[in-house]
Amino acid sequence: MSKNSLDNIDAKLSEMLTNSTRVFDISMNALLGDTNLDSVRDDLYDTDKAINELHREVRREMIIHSAVNSRNLDIPLLLSYMTMSKDIERIGDYCKNLFEIAETGNTFAKGDDLDSYIELRNDIGKLIVYLQSCIALDDESKVQDLITLGSSISTDIDKRITALLENKEKVQYPVATTLFFRYLKRIVSHIVNAATALIMPTDQIDYLDE
């Protein structure tokens, strides 16, 4: 792919992640704070729509490039960008799921676990920003660090989910809390999957543990 094409796609992916940070913050603040949901709902859904449009723009960019350079295509690179774009787009979808938990009246603004939830929110928020920096920098070690950190966070979330399912952890809203952790795990998984597309062979993207 030409440098201009790569730069355009990288810029759109970066913008998708900027918007992902916004929808993540909105949804988590709705669950962990005293946010007036009506005051942020339009912002959340409008920002998610912007992510979806950027996802479509990345696809169009690749289609145009394929048509112009049909005899000299870098197929693995195109597939990597397609995977990254889709994974980033899915972050917004799970953020909407988190917001929907808040809309049911199940929030975690009070309780003994609030500090640990805030810490988890901060760690995942940093992962999104870290992925954005990995796209901008050609540094495999940073990508490996992100994958390692993301995998560790995912393992910790799994332990919380297992404890809830086995009724070993008492919480005020057991169903909502289980969904909360499940959606956060999916967000982390999509971040890590997007990172694998930066360094893994095409056939190993999304299959980190296999």
Image (cartoon, rainbow, N blue to C red):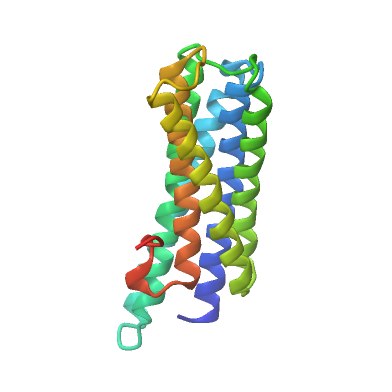
The outermost residue toward the bottom is 71
Number of residue marks: 0
Q: Quadrant of residue 8?
A: bottom right
Image quadrant holding the C terminus, namely bottom left
Q: Residue at x 45, y 66 (%)?
A: 197
Which of 135/125 is in front?
125
Which of 59/159 is in front?
159
Can the viewer see residue 97?
Answer: no
Can the viewer see residue 50?
Answer: yes
Which of 185/195 is in front?
185
Find residue 57 and report its horizontal and vertical position in percent.
44, 58
Above or below, 21 relative to 87: above
Q: Residue at x 62, y 36 (%)?
A: 121
Above or below, 162 relative to 156: above
Image side of residue 8 versus residue 58, left or right: right
Image quadrant holding the N terminus, namely bottom left
Above or below, 50 relative to 1: above
Which of 152/132 is in front?
152
Find residue 63 and report its horizontal and vertical position in percent.
34, 68
Q: Quadrant of residue 135?
A: bottom right
Q: Residue at x 63, y 67 (%)?
A: 142
Find residue 77 and report its horizontal and vertical position in percent.
41, 75
Above or below, 35 relative to 5: above
Image side of residue 124 versus residue 1, left or right: right
Q: Residue at x 54, y 24 (%)?
A: 41
Image side of residue 124 versus residue 204, left or right: right
Find residue 116 and report its horizontal and vertical position in percent.
65, 30
